[in-house]
Amino acid sequence: MKRISDNTAGKIKLTILRVVVYSILIFLCVLCLFFFYLMVINSTRSNAQLATGFSLLPKENFFKNFINAWNDSSINIPRGMLNSLIIALSTAVITTYFSALTAYGVHAYDFKGKKFVFTFIMAVMMIPAQVSALGFIQLMTRFGLTDSYIPLIIPGIAAPVVFFYMKQYMESVLPLDVIDAARVDGSSEFRTFNTIVLPMLKPAIAVQMIFSFVSSWNNYFIPALLLNKADMKTVPIMIAQLRSADYSKFDMGKVYMFILLAILPVIIVYIILSKSIIKGVTAGSVKG
């Protein structure tokens, strides 16, 4: 009887703990999504309706705001989104590929100075981008690469944070025996990496592509210093330009629609790659 009562008490405690944990998670989820929901609601309201105050119910001005924002003559939203999409997609692809390739070299090869290389890359990860920004801008100006997407894409090859994640993930899922077997079969190193290693890294690649895409899409600092032509500016620069708008003609409904359009590609990329996020994060954080 005592054992049964102990089991019952244990189950009750476990149930209470689950209820508390799920309640906290639901609260945090609602808190995170509330502001996004509020932005969507505000994008359906007119400037006059927004001036009246807070509302949780959508209005009828969604398509009007969309047309006004899309056809705005001062801020070319379609062009800005295309520019940001080109930069973000290109950066995400080369960042994940070359970081995985670098991690593969450090993981699969045993060479002199291997520990130093790993330590050096980790040290570079600690240096903020703002520290080297001035020198980088001067160098790009000297090379004539201002108003060009090259300085915004090519530096993505060197991404210490992504390298570290890929290296840890490889230690979890990529045994060296697989690589040795491919070498015995006569496979070249690049073929081994592209046809054997990369498919094993799909969850990690999906996770890092999302992070790299979002980071590049939201990047304002370096593009604002390099891009001067109006038809080459990215979405964050255009959003910043809203601060200098004429407030006598300021349409908040159009502004909320602009912000909604700005984050829409990020949501789409997340939805496409979301199936691999939990699997990738879990496998990458736990060494098997």
Image: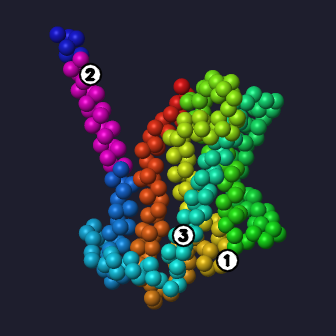
Label 2 environment density (alpha carbons within 10 Å; few <14, some 14–19, many ≥20): few
State the residue in front, 127 or 205.
Answer: 205
Q: Mark 2 points at which residue?
A: 10
Question: Which secondary structure lies at badge 1?
Answer: loop
The answer to whether residue 284 is visible is yes
Residues at discs 1 and 2 in contact (Cβ within 8 Å) = no
Mark 3 against mark 1, which lies toward the viewer? Answer: 3
- Looking at numbered disc 3 in the image, what kind of residue is underneath it? Leu
Q: Is residue 18 magenta?
A: yes
Q: Does the magenta stretch include residue 221?
A: no
Q: Mark 1 points at which residue?
A: 228
Mark 1 against mark 2, which lies toward the viewer? Answer: 1
Q: Indicate the position of residue 107 as horizontal and vertical percent values.
A: 68, 32
Looking at marks 1 and 2 on the same chain, the residue that comes earlier in the sequence is marked by 2
Residue 97 horizontal side relative to residue 140, left or right: left
Residues at discs 3 and 1 in contact (Cβ within 8 Å) = no
State the residue in front, 208 or 225.
Answer: 208
Question: Which secondary structure lies at badge 2?
Answer: helix
Query: For the magenta stretch, what is the residue range?
Result: 7-28
Q: Mark 3 points at which residue?
A: 82
Looking at marks 2 and 3 on the same chain, the residue that comes earlier in the sequence is marked by 2
**Quadrant hosting residue 179:** top right
- Looking at numbered disc 1 in the image, what kind of residue is underneath it? Asn
- Looking at numbered disc 2 in the image, what kind of residue is underneath it? Gly
Q: Residue 66, labelled with which disc?
A: none
The answer to whether residue 219 is visible is no
Could you tell me which residue is drawn at 35 percent across and 72 percent down?
42
State the separation of the CA atoms marked 1 and 2: 65 Å
Mark 2 against mark 3, which lies toward the viewer? Answer: 3
